[in-house]
Image: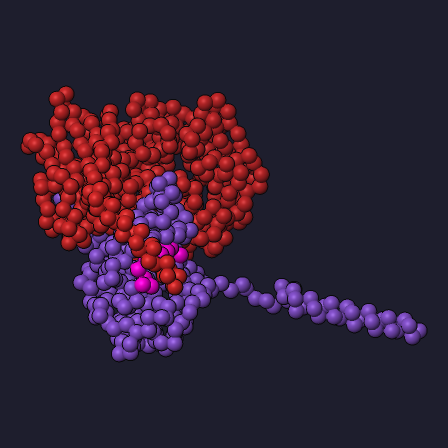
Chain colours: A purple, B red
Amino acid sequence: MKPFQQSLACSVAFHAAIVGAAYVAIPHLKADIGPPEDVIVVEVVEIAEETNASAPVSKPEPVPEPEPEPTPPPPEPEPEPAPPPPEPEPEPAPPPPESDFEPEPEPEPEPEPEPEPEPEPEPEPEPEPEPEPEPGKEAVVIPAKPEPSVLTSKKPKQKPQPPDPFASVLKTLEELKEQASPQPEPKEDEPEEKKEKTLSFDEQIAEALKIQSTKPADSSKPISISVREAVAAQLRKCWIVPAGAKDAQNLVIGIRVDMNPDATVRNSMIMDMERALTDNFFRAAAESALRATKNPQCQPLPLPLDRFDQWRTMTLNFNPQDML
Amino acid sequence: MMIRLQLLPTWKHGSPMKFFKTLVLLLLVIGFSDQAYAELKIDITRGTVEPLPVAVTRFVGEGVDEGNYGKSISDVISADLERSGLFRPIDPRAFIQTADDLNNVPRFGDWRVIDAQALVQGRVALVADGRLRVEFRLWDVFAEQQMIGLAYFTVPDNWRRVAHIIADAIYKRLTGEDGYFDTRIVYIAQQSEGGACRGTSPLNPFGKRLAIMDQDGENHRYLTNGDSLVLTPRFSPTLQEIIYMSYHGNVPRVYIFNIDSGYQEVVGDFPGMTFSPRFSYDGETVIMSMARDGNSDIYTMNLRTRETRRLTRHSGIDTSPSFSPDGRFVVFNSDRGGSQQLYVMSTDGGTPRRISHSRGRYATPVWSPRGDLIAFTKLQGGRFFIGVMRPDGTGERLLAEDYKIEAPTWAPNGRVLMFFRKNKSSADGSGGRSRLFTIDLTGHNEREVATLCDASDPAWSPLNP
């Protein structure tokens, strides 16, 4: 009997070990693994202790650019026009604009999670027929006001800029639940900065650079992430993305840029010329990125002037992934 | 309608010397930059979604006639581009360099100052044989390069079409996708509140007539006289033909109508009532529903061989079929699962797969010409929506909503939808107008297409041949 008990014990222990190992090593066997979370891609970059950007020589004017758009930079944490929400609560309920839609009292209670909340971040439910550049026989007149363009809305005080640009390039009337989470993402790493909405991101960057500027720049350090982010933020404003295009989310456009010492772009070119010559859509998209780098409104770039060596040439990768 | 096309040579800008200098500098830069640091890489993962500022200058011409044609043509081009929502034509009053002064290479600085990123210039001339020669050039203002230059010959009456063709060329060059301006719309015109379009036949009291017009509402005309009721017209993707359902002789049947000849014929010899027809994208096959003994199923008919085939066999009501662009699949709506939903099946047969899963009822699915999306009408909570989803049912987005909106139809490039919207009548019976609208895939650019009478059931043509 003893040998049997022994082997039984052995067997039990062995099986327990296997089950235990499986539990640890094959996590998907666990029942309560929950829904897969969206993958958050984090770029690993070197971050210097302090920014090594140099004096604010070219700094003072990253924002006041006399552009048509009042520079509410897209990357803003909460691009929401609604200022109140103090808590990051992604509640779809608050949006006021809904209501007056339902003309007839729907017998339905409210189970519809979809059309009701009308989470439309942008203030334009219906673009309204409006100006209607109706081409008459011969008397056609180009709309006197070029401004209104696409995104006309009833609200008179709308900015010339598209309504809440980045919450959704592709509008949907449905509740944008998913959006609630991805949106704050870029923010996550600096949660308390959300509070001060008065400063735009660019301004904050400019501010940060100014503060540091009393220290002599250390040209041995690599260009910091904040500088790169500031450059990206500036170029964003000048890049008109191919919205609505097929498979736009898979676009990656590499642009090689040669810089002048004053941080203006001397020359820029499409890196994958081969594809640009054979693929009309890629060429058009690549040219849109090229125009962003050549647009005088987005120059000079907010780069530390004493580190010219490090940004004499740059590779800019344009990819609308965060918008679609 | 003959239009001849000619490629214009590129006007070069800059000298070889400048190019050489640039090259040397570039080489120097590459040589020097190979230092201690890896090249700086920056990712730009967002941009703005605004229309591209474009300057469309007046097309110039020698004589008065040419000048008038030129003005009209550039106005139509400008209006086309503006309506697409992708471009913002700049007010010509802001132009610094005048159209007449644009004889040679533009002064790009003058255009940069007014924020133009693209510049369109053109010229109109009446040539010896009485034809009109229209040429245009599209310039990239920042790159200071010509992007495209073309010339067209046509009869003067055809100027509007030439303008649309040029707008398409500009659209294609700047977006990389085909345009849709040189297209037409067929739709059902009917009596409006004022009675302007009232019918005369007792069989068709609302005067529902087949009408056709350019994509921008111009060149409107009626195709049928209103003697019989006409519904659900669809354009052939390849020919100047329209398929629709008509109550001719009080029997609902599917007919094909040739726009050029005005000839109309019934499609197939079916024992039951046939309805909701559509062409396949190669134009060779027709797909439709046939109702018999209270049940509707999907049938196809090859227009050459006249061979018919039954695709679905189910006690549910299967209607509104639409082919995928490659002809391998069909999407339709059916109440076989209890409520009206969208199903996709292979044209070879097999079991249909349900693709719509959220609440509400779905109808009139239409497969996009570029294949990536299916547009539909959705009814939920007493409201109508126009939406799109991928063919596997994912990515549903609702683009427009109203008391009653219906019948989406795709522009041939698959980026814009047209549909009709009917207002609710007010208590005194007024209102209730039915009108046509377009909306682009971003959902941000909705426009009305003005029509004289009430309009419904629009169908977008392919690019004109």
Q: Which of A298 and B337 is in front in this view?
A: A298
Q: Position of residue B200 (x, y in %)?
A: 25, 31
Q: In which quarter of the image is the N terminus of chain B?
A: top left
The residue lying at 31 percent from left, 34 percent from top is: B463
- Extent of the magenta region: A309-321
In the rendered image, residue B204, in percent from the top left (x then y), is placed at: 31, 33
Residue at the location (32% across, 45% down)?
A284
Position above or below: A323 against B133: below
Q: Can residue B163 be seen in this view?
A: yes
Q: Give above or below for A275 relative to B442.
A: above
Q: In which quarter of the image is the C terminus of chain B?
A: top left
Relative image position of residue B341 (x, y in whole percent): 48, 48
Does A319 appear in magenta? yes
Is residue B187 part of the magenta span, yes or no?
no
Q: Residue at x 25, y 59 (%)?
A: A260
The reply, left or right, for residue A91 in relation to residue B110 is right
Residue at the farthest left position: B64
Residue nearest the viewer, comparing A243 with A112: A243
Is residue A154 among what the camera can see? no
Image point (21%, 46%), residue name: B18
Q: Quadrant of the rendered structure where residue A55 is?
A: bottom left
Query: Looking at the image, how many numbered discs can be counted on the residues?
Result: 0
Q: Position of residue A104 (x, y in %)?
A: 34, 58
Question: Residue B62 occupies which quadrant of the picture?
Answer: top left
Farthest residue to the right: give it.
A1
B382 or A40: nearer the viewer? A40
